[in-house]
Amino acid sequence: MNSNFARLAVYAGSFDPPTLGHLDLIERSSHLFSDVIVAIGKHPSRNPLFTVQERIDLVTEVSAHLANVTIASFEGLLVDFCRQVNARVIVRGLRAATDFEYELQIAHANADLFPEVDTVFLPTRTKNGFISASLVREIASHGGDASRYAPAPVCAALRERFRK
């Protein structure tokens, strides 16, 4: 690939757990950009179901077929992470119009804090439009089958987590 067109994109989120919607956006981003970092945020105020390392392992496993995708974790502001890795593109998924208002506000703030970064919005595929990590957690916590919403390794990890 011509290096003039090489672009590193960051797709950030909590991925607690990674869903088929997340995987779809990772795959689509990997086709649009020369390199993609899936950045898993560490939020001190949140109590995630899976540890950061477990989420890194799950996202690594489900995206292993994508040679230009790497997984990392970060703390603090996403724009600071983008500066650190020299990324100029942030990828965000949109499920509904309500997501757009929130995401646009964040994109404006990110651009204000780091003018060299652009946010690219990818609409979810219709089949994934209602899938969220919280939906997957809720189904799995009650022993339901989340396999239509999350990759097989994630479903196995959820079954193991809720067995305890």
Image: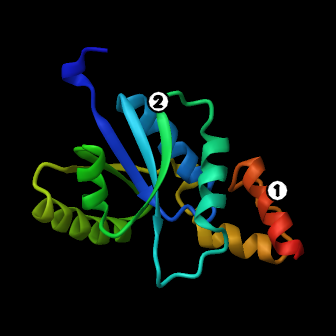
Give the image quarter of residue 60: top right
Indicate the amino acid at tag 1: Ala
Kind of residue indicated by mark 2: Asn
Q: Residue at x 34, y 70 (%)?
A: 76
Furthest residue toward bottom: 45
Q: Position of residue 157 (x, y in %)?
A: 78, 60
Question: Is 118 placed left or right of 24 in the picture?
Answer: left
Residue closest to the far right: 163
Q: Is residue 159 left or right of residue 66?
A: right
Residue 132 percent location from the top left of the image: 57, 65
> Could you tell which of marks 2 and 1 lies nearer the N-terminus?
2
- Whole-percent x and y of residue 18? 61, 57
Q: Taking the image as drawn, is residue 94 in sight? A: no
Quarter of the picture containing the C terminus is bottom right
Regarding residue 14, the answer to whether it shows in the image is: yes
Question: Seen in the image, is 162 located left or right of residue 64?
Answer: right
Relative to 141, residue 108 above or below:
above
Q: Secondary structure at mark 2?
A: loop
Tell which of 54 and 147 is nearer to you: 54
Label 2, label 1: how many angstroms apart (C-alpha)? 26 Å
Q: Nearer the viewer, mark 2 or mark 1?
A: 2
Q: Residue at x 10, y 64 (%)?
A: 112
Q: Identify the mark at residue 68; answer none if there is no mark.
A: 2
Q: Quadrant of the N terminus?
A: top left
Residue wearing tag 1: 156
At a point 35% along the width and 32% down the height, the residue shown is: 33
Label 1: element kind = helix
Q: Image point 75% across, 71% down: which residue? A: 139
Q: Nearer the viewer, residue 158 or 136?
A: 158
Residue 23: horizontal and vertical position, in percent?
57, 46
Front one among 92 and 45: 45
